[in-house]
Amino acid sequence: QVQLVESGGGLVQPGGSLRLSCAASGSIFSIYAMGWYRQAPGKERELVASITNGGSTNYGDSVKGRFTISRDNAKNTVYLQMNSLKPEDTAVYYCKASLNAALGLRIYWGQGTQVTVSS
């Protein structure tokens, strides 16, 4: 139906950068928003950043000023540019898409991509 494919995760040194991508494919008619969440071992999943189809953005407090979310609506793709990475950014990062439907939103999640920040 709808699939989210993430890429760009990996191992990076503290202070380094990574760029994550998430492409949505399938039965897509209208996307309300896309975003990134992350989950570290022993912690709950938390918002990293989100962006609406119109371009409005939200960021988690811990990443604001370091991470930037962007999207290419024509490609149904969202990006997360992560700069000045810290060890506490280590987590599995999940892409989320909120699709418009007749009676509300349908939520889809990617499989997650590991980001490890370590020296």
Image: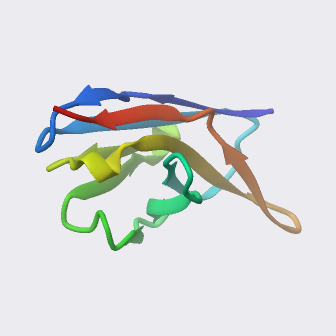
Q: Position of residue 1 (x, y in %)?
A: 81, 33
Quadrant position of residue 27 = top right
Residue furthest right in the image: 103
Instruction: Find residue 33 and report its horizontal and vertical position in percent.
Output: 56, 60
Residue drawn at point x = 27 percent, y = 56 percent: 68
Residue 106: x percent and y percent? 78, 56
Q: Quadrant of residue 58?
A: bottom left
- In-front residue for pair 41/91: 41
Q: Residue at x 11, y 44 (%)?
A: 15
Q: Which residue is outermost to the left?
A: 15
Can see residue 52?
Answer: no
Residue 30 visible in rendering: yes
Count of numbered labels shown in the rendering: 0
Residue drawn at x 39%, y 69% as measured from the top left: 60
- Name the quarter where the C terminus is drawn: top left
Residue 86 vertical position relative to residue 111 in the rendered view, above or below: below
Residue 83 shown left or right of residue 2 in the figure = left
Q: Who is closer to the viewer here, 63 or 29?
A: 63
Q: Is residue 56 above or below residue 77?
A: below
Task: Identify which residue, 38 or 55, lies in the foreground.
Answer: 38
Q: Is residue 77 left or right of residue 62?
A: right
- Determine whether, in the image, residue 12 is placed left or right of residue 77: left
Residue closer to the observer: 57 or 13: 13
In this picture the colour scheme is rainbow
Residue drawn at x 57%, y 57% is 45
Q: Is residue 83 left or right of residue 1?
A: left
Indicate the position of residue 95 as horizontal and vertical percent values: 54, 44
